[in-house]
Amino acid sequence: LHGDCMTCTGKTVAENLAGIDGVPKAEQDVILPMEQPKSKEGHLVVLKGNLAEEGCVAKVSGIKTSKIVGPARVFESEEECLTAILDDRIKAGDVVVIRYEGPKGGPGMREMLAPTSAIVGKGLGEEVGLITDGRFSGGTFGLVVGHVAPEAQIGGMIAFVNEGDTITIDVEHNQIQVDLSNEELEKRKAGWTPPPIKYESGVLSKYAKLVSTASLGAVTD
């Protein structure tokens, strides 16, 4: 805790907590010691692999399937993907890829809740995987992976996945992979140029130029 941070009380954090005992009361069950966790496993998992060298995040609470291996279904935007889902073009076993929705590509790292909700609505929530360089808030269900970094807009490997490539999402082993050699990925990357930023002026244009990768917090310092 940063004690010098100002709070809505008009006092700093340290001032607000000055009269509180530093050791939690034995009978309370809100803040527990390390040796007495609420759960043996956390609800968020960081995955890494050739699709996310800087990492990505999956919420695993409530999932029944910890691994999926399937063909990539590639979309360049949330809207394009949502249309495909609603048109019944996504089938059980597919791994949906939504890219160019990261901090720079969005810009702003939009939340991809609509496509995941549509997948659940089609009865495919436990049978389809989804990965994106966009964002999730925690309201998702199923084997969905967000915050992929580096993002597509800056040449992350998610930009070079082709329709039909085999993708593996394995939360038990913290892995996310496309079944391609490093040589093939580098070959696809050769000569690639990023698409233009979606905004040429204004706040979002400035944001896209300044924002960092998601793995560093997508900050603009």
Image (cartoon, helix red, strand yellow):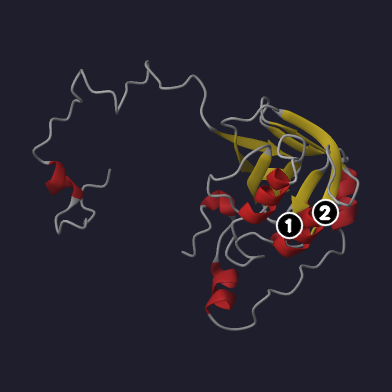
- Viewer-nearest residue: 77 or 180: 77
Work out whether residue 174 or residue 129 is closer to the camera in this orientation and state it.
Answer: 129
In the image, farthest residue toward the bottom: 201
Q: Secondary structure at mark 1?
A: loop
Q: Residue at x 49, y 19 (%)?
A: 40
Q: Is 33 rendered above or below residue 86?
A: above
The answer to which image quadrant residue 87 occupies is bottom right
40 or 103: nearer the eye?
Answer: 40
Q: Which quadrant is the N terminus positioned in? A: top left
How far across and down, in percent of the image, does residue 28 sit?
23, 23
**Hey, what amino acid is under mark 2?**
Val
Label 2 sits on a secondary structure element that is strand
Q: Can you give x and y, in whole percent of width and height, for residue 95 in the image? A: 80, 43
In the displayed orientation, state which residue is furthest to the top: 35
Q: Is 206 situated above or below 150? A: below
- Amino acid type indicated by mark 1: Arg
Sequence-wise, the earlier of marks 2 and 1 is 2
Let me know if residue 134 appears in the view.
no
Taking the spot 60% from the left edge, 44% from the top edge, the residue there is 140
Residue 183 in the image: state x and y as whole percent: 89, 45
Which residue carries the number 2 mark? 74
- Decide: is 142 above or below 35: below
Residue at point 15% right, 41% down? 17
Q: Which residue is the site of mark 1?
A: 99
* Callouts 2 and 1 close, C-beta under 8 Å: yes
Residue 78, image x, y percentages: 71, 60
Image: 53 above or below 86: above
Q: Within 10 angstroms of label 2, few (less than 14), some, or many (20 or more) residues?
A: many
Please indicate, yes or no, whether residue 79 appears anywhere in the rendered image. Answer: yes
Corner quadrant of residue 139: top right
